[in-house]
Image (spheres, grey):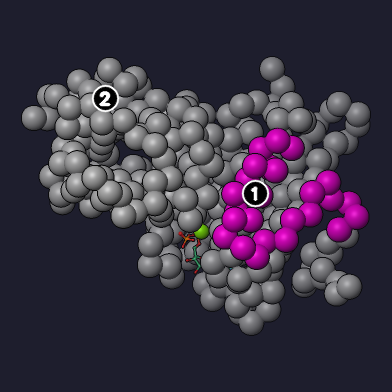
Amino acid sequence: MDDKNFNDIDININDYDIVLKIKDENDIAVSRQMAKSFAQKNNFSLADVTKIATAVSELSRNIYRYAKEGYIYIKKKETEPDKDVSIEIIAYDRGPGIENVEQAVAGGYTTSERSLGLGLSGIRRLIDSFYIKSEVGKGTVVMAEKRRRRF
Amino acid sequence: MKTKFTMVVPTIKLYDYLIVPIQIELDDLTIEKLQMQLLNEISEKKIRGIILDVSMVDVIDSYISFVLSETAAMAKAMGCHTVICKIQPQVALTLAQMGIKLKDVFTANSLEGAVDILNRLD
Ligand SMILES: Nc1ncnc2c1ncn2[C@@H]1O[C@H](COP(=O)(O)OP(=O)(O)O)[C@@H](O)[C@H]1O
Ligand SMILES: [Mg+2]
């Protein structure tokens, strides 16, 4: 099995609760449903469940559309039992990469014909921490984390 | 009358309005088929107003938003207005936070409200 090593990110697939290969259009819908039920199961608020599912939907679509195939990794992170719970999402592909990452993340920029260019910029606003690494000819990794709010 | 297009969502005709309760997962292929279906129904059934009930839709991402707005723009060109009704609050919140605006559509929080909007437009 090829290693999921991309620059400085080392993804050990055994750490993840969900590993999903994205290669068909239908996988986009599957990924957001899985993200939704995972966030629900971990007691995230309804608003945050929706934000997480929407972010995953955007990431999967980018993989399908721009890289043809790739992976979505999702895991629950907690510092102590029942304390500071968060969900981490990684989207990984070995597609063409993004030439101007800053521009792509700023929003309103798209190389697609029927698209808004508000995926990556939108994800950034929906989640708590966001990291992207992309290299032309190598691929793209996006890491997004959402903390569970306490009531 | 024979329908030459795939019906992905069963619709209800009310006067010259078309009520479209979306109760299925909107994957990319489905939403594109739905767009075709609606445009066909507008022309075949002389529809002057479409009401999309999205109360069962729990994720609307940027592409679904794009296709909904695109469909409404096409409908408008055919003399038909589009109202999106009963959008889930958390879905509306997510769209607003992402900076996504649904263009060319009216919004209502009930079916009655949607009908009122269409009546007022006539
Ligand atoms: N995984 C990816 N691989 C290559 N290019 C990507 C990837 N994700 C995003 N991009 C590039 O960044 C742009 C912005 O992406 P996004 O914000 O999701 O908006 P949209 O998908 O609507 O264009 C895309 O148009 C594409 O050029
Ligand atoms: Mg996108």
Q: Quadrant of the C terminus of chain A?
A: top right
Percent position of residue A63, x then y? 61, 64
Q: Is residue A125 left or right of residue B43?
A: right
Q: Tell me which amino acid carries mark 1.
A: Val
Circle 2: element type: helix
- Residue placed farthest to the left in the image? B122
Which secondary structure is most common in the magenta stretch? helix
Tell me the subunit letter for badge 2. B
Q: Tell me which amino acid carries mark 2.
A: Ala
The image quadrant that residue A149 belongs to is top right
Q: Is residue A107 left or right of residue A6?
A: left
Q: Quadrant of the N terminus of chain A?
A: bottom right
The residue that mark 1 highlights is: A30
Q: Residue at x 64, y 82 (%)?
A: A137
Percent position of residue A64, x then y? 59, 65
Q: Residue at x 54, y 66 (%)?
A: A65
User: What stretch of residues is rendered in magenta?
Assistant: A13-38
The image quadrant that residue A44 belongs to is top right
Q: Residue at x 49, y 30 (%)?
A: B56
Q: Label 1 CB, ligand 2: below 8 Å?
A: no
Q: CA distance from mark 1 to mark 2?
A: 31 Å
- Residue placed farthest to the front in the image? B1
Q: Residues within 10 Å of mark 1 (few under 14, many from 20)?
A: some
Q: Residue at x 34, y 53 (%)?
A: B5
Q: Which mark is residue B114?
A: 2
Q: Residues within 10 Å of mark 2 (few under 14, many from 20)?
A: many
Percent position of residue B115, x then y? 23, 23
Tell me the subunit letter for badge 1. A
Instruction: Please tell me whether residue B95 is drawn above or below residue A143 in the rendered image.
Output: above
